[in-house]
Structures are given as structure tokens and as C-alpha cells.
């Protein structure tokens, strides 16, 4: 499919056709939504970013005075978005998503697995709560988890990560279980203008063609790296849910973390995740004391396992580090 960048399309016989003005919808976005809807088993809508998708969902579902129960240790940007909306009457309470959500919440917001703690939510406990359930499945992808089949009402993805997969398209997705919810979100998206442009949607469509291959290969490599890191004397608390390309582990403290960040040669010291190139960073620079000072998050790409391990082993092996070959 080629990219149609039109912002306007001619009426036919004086009547608007499927597409008439880009803010309402465009062919590349519609095709991406068709594919994403199949992948998650629901009605998909693309947004200009994952954070844009989060904003749209909250504004569509909640009113001033409502409370969101947010999974503790979930993506810090989600809590930051909700904090912006406090001025508009929104309240947030954090809870341990491995157990039941608190009573009285108007919306339950889970993350599967959470970023960067890699915990998995108790989907059954959330589904039996009276409030509606959103699962941010950015790190799981629909290849490993289809939350709508497990009682969730909405799935959210930062498509910037695994779905597009090449660190060159900023996009978000909400997949609704019910068609009427998707229709409401579509209306809100059009009114607020939190829309995705055709070019990133094209890159997303291209990324989706290799999604399954990529995440299976990333899982294979990440599983083995997690195993080896777990046995390394300089490493504690390897967190890996058993699938996907995202893991985190702790070194002793901030200096050790900085040392690893600046010693890597193959793995890029950068933020984000889900791309074909491996990236690693200390999360404390963004999240402060929400995370251990020595927590390093690694997003495993498609490089050969042994090359990645050589890079990590070398970065973890210097005088002063426990277990170093001095
Ligand atoms: C990156 C990320 C987001 C935000 O998505 P953007 O595309 O950066 O706006 C939301 N949730 C999770 C789990 C993420 O990793």
C-alpha cells in the first residue's frame, strides 16, 4: 500500500465518501486499524502517541471526581499524564496489580507486563471488579497476550515500541471490545485532534508484517540473557516475565549503573524499547526514587545473542565491581 497524504478528498455526486478530511480518518490509518483490530480481537483506533491514546481514553470514559486505580510501578509517563488531569478533577490511586483492585475505583488501569518492574496483572481479579478495565499491553504485544479475551474492556499500546518496531514512528493504539466505545473514542479523537498522520501509520503497517518474527526472536535472546545475567556476580534482581524482549536488572548503585551505560559498544545507551536495536538505560534518571538507583532496563533487539552477551559482560566487568576479573 502507498501513502495517501491528502488532507481532503473530493465528494462524490455532492456527498462525502469514506474519506473527506484527514482529521476524521485516512486510508493508511484505516488499514492499520483493520490489522490492529484483528491482532487484538476488537475495534482499533490509532492516535498520535501512546500518551495521546491514554489521554483520549481517560477523557472519553471519566468525569470530574472519578478515580483511576493505576497499577503501581507502571510506565511513569502514564501516572504523569493522570497527574496533569488532576486539575480537571481526576483522582488516581496506585495498587498492586498482582492482586485485586481497590473498591470504589471508576477505571482500572493495568500494565502487562509493567515497565520497568515486569510484573503481570491479575486479569481475573480485575475483570470481576465492577469498573471498566484498561490493559496497557505495550510490552506484551498481541502476540503474547490478548487482554480482551481475558475480561478487559480496552487494550492500549504505545505502537512506537514493538508494533512499529524500528524506532522511527510515534503512535498509540486503543483497541475496544465494544463497537460503541470505539465510536465514542473516534468522535472524541476527531474533536480533540489527537490523530495519527499517514506516514507513521505506513511505518506501523510495515512493522506489523514482521511483528511475530521479531518478538519471538527477541524472546529467545532475552530469555538467555536473563538467565546469564542472573548468574553474574555484579547483578541482582533480574526481572523477566518469561516472554518478550524487555527485562530489567540491578547493579549496586548509580555509579555502577552509569559505568555500564557508558561502557556498552553494541547496545545503545538510550531510552525507549521495542525496536530492532537493543537499548539500555538507568531508569532513575527519569523516575527518581520510584526505582532502585542501580536499575537498568534493557530492551533486547535482533542482534546475535553472543554479541549482546559479550557487550554486557564487558560492561559489567571492571575493577571495583563484584566478581570483576581484576
Ligand atoms: C512508551 C510507553 C507509553 C507511552 O507511549 P508514547 O508512544 O511514548 O507516547 C505508554 N505505555 C508504555 C508501557 C510505554 O512503554
Image (cartoon, rainbow, N blue to C red):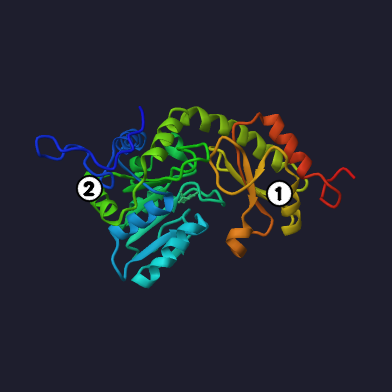
Residue 91 coordinates in the image, percent (x, y): 38, 69
- Judging from the image, what secondary structure is the residue with disc 2 in? helix
Which image quadrant is residue 290 in? bottom right
Q: Sort mark 1 into few (<14), some (14-19) or many (20+) by Cα contacts within 10 Å.
A: many
- According to the image, label 2 marks what residue? 183
Q: Is residue 209 left or right of residue 195?
A: right
Looking at marks 2 and 1 on the same chain, the residue that comes earlier in the sequence is marked by 2
Q: Which mark is residue 192?
A: none
Question: Could you give the CA–CA distance between mark 2 and mark 1, rounded to whole angstroms?
Answer: 45 Å
Q: Residues within 10 Å of mark 2 (few under 14, many from 20)?
A: some
Asked if disc 1 is less than 8 Å from ligand 1, the answer is: no
Q: Residue at x 33, y 38 (%)?
A: 5
- In terms of image quadrants, where is residue 63? bottom left
In x, y percent, where is residue 159?
44, 42
User: In this rendering, is residue 175 above or below 194?
Assistant: above
Query: Which residue reaches farthest left?
Result: 13
- Residue 199, compared with residue 283, is above or below; it is above
Residue that numbered label 1 is attached to: 261
Amino acid at each position: 500500500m502507498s501513502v495517501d497524504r491528502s488532507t481532503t478528498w473530493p465528494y462524490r455526486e455532492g456527498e462525502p465518501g469514506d474519506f473527506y478530511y484527514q482529521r476524521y480518518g485516512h486510508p493508511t490509518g484505516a488499514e492499520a486499524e483493520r490489522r490492529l483490530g484483528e491482532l487484538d480481537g476488537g475495534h482499533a483506533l490509532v492516535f498520535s502517541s501512546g500518551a495521546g491514546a491514554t489521554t483520549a481514553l481517560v477523557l472519553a470514559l471519566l468525569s470530574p471526581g472519578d478515580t483511576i486505580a493505576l497499577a503501581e510501578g507502571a510506565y511513569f509517563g502514564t501516572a504523569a499524564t493522570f497527574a496533569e488531569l488532576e486539575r480537571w478533577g481526576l483522582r488516581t490511586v496506585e495498587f498492586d496489580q498482582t492482586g485485586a483492585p481497590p473498591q470504589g475505583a471508576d477505571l482500572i488501569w493495568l500494565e502487562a507486563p509493567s515497565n520497568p518492574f515486569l510484573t503481570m496483572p491479575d486479569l481475573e481479579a480485575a475483570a470481576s471488579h465492577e469498573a471498566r478495565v484498561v490493559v496497557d499491553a505495550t510490552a506484551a504485544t498481541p502476540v503474547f497476550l490478548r487482554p480482551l479475551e481475558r475480561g478487559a474492556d480496552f487494550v492500549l499500546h504505545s505502537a512506537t515500541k514493538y508494533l512499529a518496531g524500528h524506532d522511527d514512528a510515534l503512535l498509540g493504539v486503543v483497541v475496544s471490545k465494544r463497537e460503541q466505545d470505539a465510536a465514542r473514542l473516534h468522535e472524541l479523537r476527531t474533536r480533540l485532534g489527537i490523530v495519527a498522520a499517514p506516514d507513521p501509520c505506513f511505518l506501523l503497517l510495515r512493522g506489523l508484517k514482521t511483528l511475530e518474527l521479531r518478538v519471538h526472536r527477541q524472546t529467545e535472546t532475552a530469555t538467555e540473557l536473563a538467565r546469564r545475567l542472573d548468574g553474574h556476580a555484579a547483578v541482582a534482581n533480574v526481572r523477566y516475565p518469561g516472554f518478550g524482549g524487555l527485562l530489567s536488572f540491578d547493579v549496586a548503585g548509580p555509579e555502577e549503573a552509569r559505568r555500564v551505560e557508558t561502557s556498552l559498544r553494541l547496545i545503545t545507551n538510550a531510552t525507549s524499547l521495542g525496536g530492532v536495536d537493543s537499548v539500555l538505560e538507568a531508569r532513575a534518571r527519569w523516575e527518581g526514587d520510584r526505582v532502585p538507583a542501580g536499575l537498568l532496563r534493557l530492551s533486547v533487539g535482533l542482534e546475535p545473542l553472543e554479541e549482546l552477551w559479550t557487550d554486557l559482560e564487558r560492561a559489567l566487568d571492571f575493577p571495583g565491581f563484584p566478581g570483576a576479573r581484576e
